[in-house]
Image: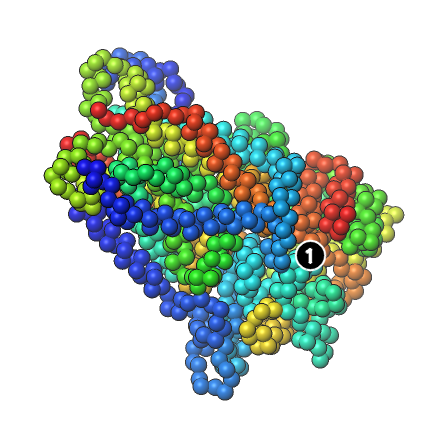
Amino acid sequence: MVKKTWPLVLVALLLTMLALTGCGSTQNASGSDNGAEASTQPSAAASTDQPASSGEKMTIKLMHLWPAGSSKQHNMIVNQIIDEYQKANPNVTIKQEILDNEQYKNKLKVISASNELPDVGMTWAAGFLEPYVKGNLFAPLDDVLGDGFKDSFVSGTTEAYAIGGKTYALPLELNITPVYYNKAIFAKYNLQPPKTYDELKQIVKTLADNGVAPAALGNKDRWTGSLWYMYLADRLGGPETLKKAIDRSGSFEDPSLVKAAEEVQNLVNMNAFNKGFNGLSNDEGKSEFMNGKAAMYMMGTWELPNYTTNESVPKEFRDSIGFFKFPTIDGGKGNVDSWVGGPGVGLFVAENSKVKDEAKKFVKYFVKRWGEESVTQAGVIPATKVDTSKVNLPQMYIDVLNELGKASNITLFADVQMSPAVAQVHLNMIQALFGGEVKPADFAKKHEEALQQESGK
Amino acid sequence: MTESAGASTAAASLTAWPSERTLPQRLGRIALYAVLIAVAVVQIFPLVWLLLFSLKNNQEVFNLSPFALPAHPRWENYAKVWTEGNISLYFWNSVWMTLTAVALTVVLASLVTFALTRLVWGWKKPVLGLFMVGLMIPVHSTLIPLFQMFLKAHLTDHPLSIILTYTAFNLPLTIMILLGFYYTLPREVEEAAIMDGCSVNRLFGQIILPMTASVLATVVIINMIYNWNEFVFINTFISSDERKTLTVGIQNFIGQYTTDWGAIGATLMISILPILAAFFALSNRIVEGITAGSVKG
Amino acid sequence: MDKVMSDKRIIALYVLPALLLVLVLIYVPIVLTGYYGLMKWDGIGAMTFVGLDNYSRLVKDALFWKSAGHSFLLAAFSTLSLIGYLAVAMVLAGRIKGANLLRKIYLVPMLLSSVAIAQLWLKMYHPSNGMLNLVLQSLGMKEPIGWLSETSIVLLALFVPIIWQYAGFYILIYYAALTNIPSSLIEAARIDGATPWQVALRVKLPLIAGVIKVTIVLAIVGSLKYFDLIYVMTDGGPNGASEVMASYMYHQAFRSFDFGYGSAIGFFLLLTCLVVTWLIRRLTASGEEVQYS
């Protein structure tokens, strides 16, 4: 026994010593407040030659949320662009840090508290952006947008990232939210894509009566249910009502917003959604649709690869999916070309970055190249305009891009428009609304109270 | 837990020693065994399920029953995970960081517990109290302060930040468990040793510490489990990919809008094997410690 | 002997390293948490001092008290389940064939990470494909139960995996304590005519009383600050039906960007644990730890 404990202690000491010298990595372990280290990164095929070039050596830290495991194509494009940039600028090394979505948001918060942001990172628009801008953490990027670059963006996308007239991030994605449907199931019950809301309700009834879940929904994540609510609000009250309620030039207790809440509950009571939706994540909800158990699925255009190019989804399924626009409601003010959607993540440059100019240059290059590669390679619709004549795309993409071209309005997702605290109230209320736990009038009231409290009593 | 079922016959079997049992009491004993085995099944089916779904693809996982066998076992999930996910790197990181932190924690905790129960000094109660308060802080409260501290100490993205944090946070629990055992150790042995001129260090290292072998195995297991599965601190303090661990590697497969279940399953299986192996190795030690007559000479 | 055992340098050597580590890495954050609790801060920009505003808001916050109630409920369930674990450990420590193997099997859930356990139970509770509902349906149930979507049962549904996760841990501790009891004592009692039942109650229990006290504190405090499975499985939903104090704090600090308030909650949680621990010690205080004669 004795002989066995002392070696343990020695091993412990040895390991601790190794830890002190940063064993297990090839990297210089000192703090990263000095941006001029040259360092290499194993997963990016970065150029390892550091020729004695004329430019000063610098490192740009990039933090993003597309891990190779789940966002393979996104990740590939990122690496490709980094490669290109590093080859063209041999004095620059780009170091990546990759996290998944939720961890990314957490980490961003923690490092912001210490003002330790990476040189380039990702952010969402509007309400998410606000605290960071208020805290002076993001650099304005209007100079990057100058000399015509702004025109390459779809109108409205960069605006979502503007606060007080200055733009703080450049969007990488643009998404709208159609309702996908399974043509095979529709054909089986002799259904056609609905043009009016009443037709939609009819479809719901038919499917529910036949034991098929009309629409797939995983509302544990809450923003998924919010999409349905937003369309109802738009079709009933027109695109401005919700927007005005949020920016405080209107009230959330507007009758059309209350009626939209009522309609949500009507749909729930008609069994429009798969069972137990309020406890299922979006992925679990989605699988109902992907497995042919639900006939419709309202989701963003980021899903398009699953219905077109993604080889791991059975071809038969992919070929049987189409989409329709959310129908209009009789007597409502919204038209069928008004969409819920908006820019996805955008790239920001940290205000206190030591390599700010180079970082801005990189961002501009990245956004431009991303726009050129993302549609064909990752099936992502970029925020920069896409020339459909130059690219070879599946039909569904062309249809979506055409719809985008004639959209009358795109309303940004509610939980992104709102400030974080109000967004939480909204999301919780959505879950309560769908679960029948709150009355429509109270639903509206709670929103109104939260919005009022935020903006000043 | 349902082991209280069949209590009456089971209890009946407890009222007599094995050699004296009557038939109904033997039946009661069988009922007891049945319950224990049922509980074991409940506890072990997660591994079975994990193995199964690590060999399926997404469609099968979502659609079929958890116990349905995969149509073709997709061993490529494992291959994919090893190559694409950088798993071998994360695996090694998990191993050495866990072991280091565990060793450090156990050594420091033993020293403290020995001092608290055997050495003579006045501030035992307050010091013990200080350690115990450490049990009570919710992890997320500490993220921002700790990050700022490590930043100032230039220890962000350094394994030392992780090892020290794990040690600090595990010390209270480890000390608490060790304490209960140290109290039950008899005093005559040490009194005799001191009489014989033994120094405190020798007393601790060669006499007391070996006597605690069984509980040491216990706290090593407990610490290993915590460190091995931890990810909040890693995610916050570590940024370079080369230093990340297995749990973070799992998170790598959970992306913005999709999840790859087969890959997650494979990663989890790979992550569990070392812990399982260590556990089986150590739990034998517990038995050894007991049978070696560690308590009474 | 006392002279040897009270050498100040030795004591410092043994105690200080651990103490310093804890003071720096745990107490500094505790103090900072208390400090941030006095601020209005979104975690990013500037802080403004608001004194005890956050705390008075806490007292009036119905949602917080709801989450506190849930935490305490979990604590109650956890403590009660300790009895079950003790029983199992007692049986195992007795003359059971295969006790070794059984003990190892019981510990398996503990080895899994929270992510793995959450995924398993999410599948179990799945409304149409989950193990539970499939079994119930085959027994004739008509409407599938939404284990995680019905606000009335979601909290209880979550308790099951939490308790299941820790079963092995407590059984292990009790088992180690029980097997540490010298068999001579048990033999002596047996010779005196005690039945196994009496041995369990009168001899074994008192000898491991210290360990039992430890586990009670662990179970309660651990429950009060519990976070993992709640966060991964329901994120406190639907609409706060399964929210506990730690998840509520997380939401305030990291989602609503109200770090000052979140810190106040964290600090309050800490104080609660302290008070509860002190209460437990008072209630179960026995003069001396039982020692072997």
The residue sitting at 42% across, 29% down in the picture is C281
* Colour pattern of the rendering: rainbow
Mark count: 1
Q: Please state the chain letter of the residue tagged with numbered disc 1 in the rendered image.
A: A
In the image as oriented, which residue stretches furthest toward the right? A331
Q: Residue furthest left?
A: B196
Residue occupying the point 70% across, 49% down:
A422
SS at badge 1: helix
Q: Give how far across and how far down residue C152 sits, in percent.
A: 61, 31
> Residue A395, image x and y in percent?
68, 64
Q: Residue at x 46, y 53 (%)?
A: B233
- The answer to whether residue C263 of the structure is visible from this angle is yes
Q: Residue at x 32, y 41 (%)?
A: B219
Q: Is residue A449 left or right of residue B183?
A: right
Q: Is residue C53 above or below residue C288?
A: below
Q: Nearer the viewer, residue C252 or C82?
A: C252
The quadrant of the picture occupied by the N terminus of chain A is top left
- Image quadrant where residue C166 sits: top left
A371 vs A22, nearest the viewer: A22
Q: Is residue B87 visible?
A: no
- Relative height, residue B267 to residue A261 (above, below): below
Question: Looking at the picture, which amino acid does disc 1 mark?
Answer: Gly
Q: Position of residue C172 (x, y in %)?
A: 34, 35
Q: Which residue is mark 1?
A: A127
Estimate the x, y position of residue B115 in percent, counting from the top left. 28, 41
Disc 1: CA contacts within 10 A as few (<14), some (14-19) or many (>=20): many
